[in-house]
Amino acid sequence: MDRRQFVRLGLHTVLAAGLGAGLTACGEGNSRGGEAGRPRLRLGYLPITDHLLLLAHDYYPFSRVALSPVKFSSWPEAAEALRVGAVDAAFLLTPLGMALRRQRTPIQAVLLGHRNGSVLTLAAREEITATAALAGKRIAIPSRFSTHYLLLRRLLADAGLPGESVHYIDMAPPEMVQALAGGRLDGFIVAEPFGAQAEIQGVGRVFTLSKEIWPGHICCVLNVREEFIQSHPEAVAELVTGLRVTGREIEADRRRAAVRSVNYLGQAPAVIEHVLTRPPDRVTYHDLFPEPADFAATREQMLRVGLREVRDIELDAYLEPAFARLPLT
């Protein structure tokens, strides 16, 4: 029996047991403490709004999986933890997840974490109004294997500028606002809420939102280790359903989501509310199905900027969309 047959059989068992409907309930319960016989899933994330679906830990009454969030301060740390099995799943940047898979890390992408959600922020002291004026500027990115690097390269290309027009500085996202305020950077492009944080503090201003560079782009993706999928398909099914329902709940009450985010993101609710409402589609959580075309577009953009490590990745083997097909009520 191959992997996909195994997963389909597991999902068939879930649905046959009547859990397809049961998985769609939403409430205030959480999985802290768990119950006997319930597999624990260690889920890696960064304290960014791209990973706000972690609110499922509070929002959704999990009964088939004990969800244990594990916070990291950078994507390389989260990726390494997933690679060595220190976590069972993690939200990772799409290029990073694809690179891990290409390196034979046994992971699969089962759900998007969001769409859009990043921002190119420039120092408030800068009076730049045109992309051409970015030439020579020091712009921080979290990694060359990041959606943010692809976004910036796309922005430059659209303006007719070569990729090396700016000075790229690799930096962990939590360090960017302070570096901008201290004059060590001219700008940064990264996931929220750091752009909003710089705005509110008066040290930065939005040059462009990522949705204006690449409308509806994917960025962070939920990757799960294959052994966990194969051993506990019913747990992964419930996890994916819980995250999807949570995305719907976030968009239905953004203020509540901002308040509840404190335990996971560590930011003032006003900062998160700023991200979720100005404008409301700055980041979205409703269109989360892992479409092959989105991943193919990311791979194409990576190849265009010289990241050839994923040129022969088998997307059909990397993507496992069966869990995201489960019905919601």
Image (cartoon, rainbow, N blue to C red):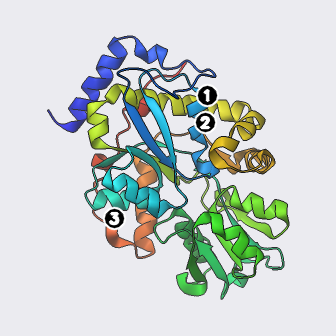
Q: Earlier in the sequence, mark 3 or mark 1?
A: 1
Q: Amino acid at mark 3?
A: Val
Q: CA distance from mark 3 to mark 2?
A: 32 Å
Query: For mark 1, does the 10 Å Cα neighbourhood hold few (<14), some (14 to 19), or many (20 or more) residues?
Result: many
Do the numbered discs 1 and 2 sit on residues whose CB atoms are within 8 Å?
A: yes
Q: Amino acid at mark 1?
A: Tyr
Q: Earlier in the sequence, mark 3 or mark 2?
A: 2
Q: Amino acid at mark 2?
A: Leu
Query: For mark 3, does the 10 Å Cα neighbourhood hold few (<14), some (14 to 19), or many (20 or more) residues?
Result: many
Most foreground residue, 283 or 157: 283
What residue is pinned by disc 3?
Answer: 310
Instruction: Kindly state the secondary structure of the residue where label 1 is placed.
Output: helix
Q: Is residue 35 left or right of residue 267?
A: left
Instruction: Kindly state the secondary structure of the residue where label 3 is placed.
Output: helix
Q: Which mark is residue 59?
A: 1
Instruction: Kindly state the secondary structure of the residue where label 2 is placed.
Output: helix
Residue 55 appears in the figure:
yes
Residue 196 vertical position relative to residue 152 in the rendered view, above or below = above
What residue is pinned by disc 2?
Answer: 55
Q: Which mark is residue 286?
A: none
Q: CA distance from mark 3 to mark 1?
A: 36 Å
